[in-house]
Amino acid sequence: MSGVHILAIESSCDETSASVISNGRILSNVIYTQKIHEQYGGVVPEHASRLHIRHILPVVQEAMSQSGIALEELNAIAYTQAPGLIGALIVGSTFAKGLAWSLNIPTLAIHHMKAHVLANLIEKPDIPFPFLCLTVSGGHTQIVQVDSPYELKVIGETIDDAAGEAFDKSAKMLGLPYPGGPLIDHHASNGNPKRFVFAKPQIEGLNFSFSGVKTSILYFLQAELKKDDQFITNNLNDLCASIQYTIVQILITKLKRAVKETGIQTIALAGGVSANKGLRSSLTQEAQKQHWQLHIPSFEYCTDNAAMIAMAAHYAYLNEEFAGDEQSANARGSF
């Protein structure tokens, strides 16, 4: 098969994933999710690294098999360079470099959050530029102005905790197992989102803050549990709905301000928390109200996956942004 074929590897946290892209079209996207972390209430970095080592080869083999592309046909190999768990990143980057060296082809070092944004181009490569992307994940919350696949600028970000962390920590307060964010989303669908009111920090500009939200929820629950030790059990759906409503409204309020300041009305959503049904629904309603052009990726491309790394790699290859051997994994790299 002629053209540009790239193998991409994602290993920033607890998903081992590989994808093959050919001439800008995703041919495969294989994801192995590490379930072991559920018993610990969060991702254990050493376990994550060991499981990446164990599963990266079969995941890559499956992605190559599904793609129909032979190793010898690859033009480059991409890997997630930053940010993420350093041990997990090293596994992916080392594997990619070794395989690329054996095939005598270049590597492409891809930024994880940039890839989340460009995941919107997988299914809709004709999204008009510029657009604003609300990127919401467990570790990051950003508003990114995207002028082209090569020009991305963060115009707003969290100054403390990310929205995904606020969901997971709130779930833990409610006694829900890890990962708790999806469980809040599940219970919220049966609850009253305006039953309980929690603090919404007033931060100037386009930046976010979620630490105050968590504190507000904690103090509220402590007070109510003193009066009724079954308070959470008896009000779980309404609590989840109210927590989700609070976090989503903070996100949408900032996005509306970004639209007003930039004049850009084409909006995209990205990151693991963009799989949240409450966020997707509220943003869709707001887009209809504000007459925005809204783009939301399929669930498969919202959580960590190698297809988004592949899409970012496709543009990096076209721009000849090849990585040198000296480039290494970085737990906190920015783009």
Image (cartoon, rainbow, N blue to C red):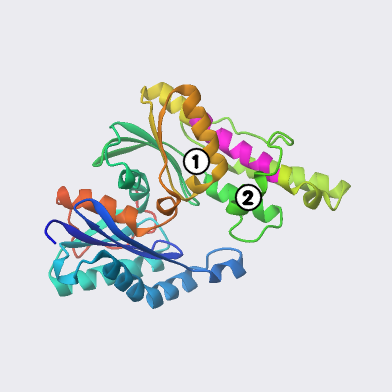
Q: Residues within 10 Å of mark 2 (few under 14, many from 20)?
A: some
> Which quadrant would residue 190 be assigned to in this image?
top right
Residue at 71%, 42% in the rendered image = 191
Distance between the alpha carbons at the discs numbered 1 and 2: 28 Å
- The answer to whether the residue labelled 1 contacts the one labelled 2, judged by CB atoms less than 8 Å apart, is no
What amino acid is labelled 1 in the image? Ile
Q: In this view of the protein, which residue sits in the foreground, 279 or 216?
A: 279
Q: In this view of the protein, which residue sits in the foreground, 283 or 258?
A: 283
Q: Indicate yes or no whether the magenta region holds residue 242.
A: yes
Q: Is residue 256 visible?
A: yes
Residue at 35%, 71% in the rendered image = 59
Q: Residues within 10 Å of mark 1 (few under 14, many from 20)?
A: some
Residue at 41%, 59% in the rendered image = 84
Q: Indicate yes or no whether the magenta region holds residue 328.
A: no
Look at the numbered disc 2 and give the secondary structure of its residue: helix
Which residue is tagged 1? Answer: 159
Which residue is tagged 2? Answer: 186
Whichever of callouts 1 and 2 sits on the residue coming sooner in the sequence is 1
> Magenta-highlighted stretch: main secondary structure?
helix
Residue 239 falls left or right of residue 51:
right
Q: In this view of the protein, which residue sits in the foreground, 239 or 152?
A: 239
Q: What span is colored magenta in the figure?
A: 239-254
Residue 11 falls left or right of residue 96:
right
What amino acid is labelled 2 in the image? His
Look at the numbered disc 1 and give the secondary structure of its residue: loop
> Which quadrant would residue 266 be assigned to in this image?
top left
Residue 36: image location, x then y, percent: 54, 71
Residue 249: image location, x then y, percent: 57, 33
Q: Is residue 99 above or below residue 28?
A: below
Q: Is residue 161 visible?
A: no
Give the position of the N terminus as an image quadrant: bottom left
Residue at 81%, 44% in the rendered image = 223
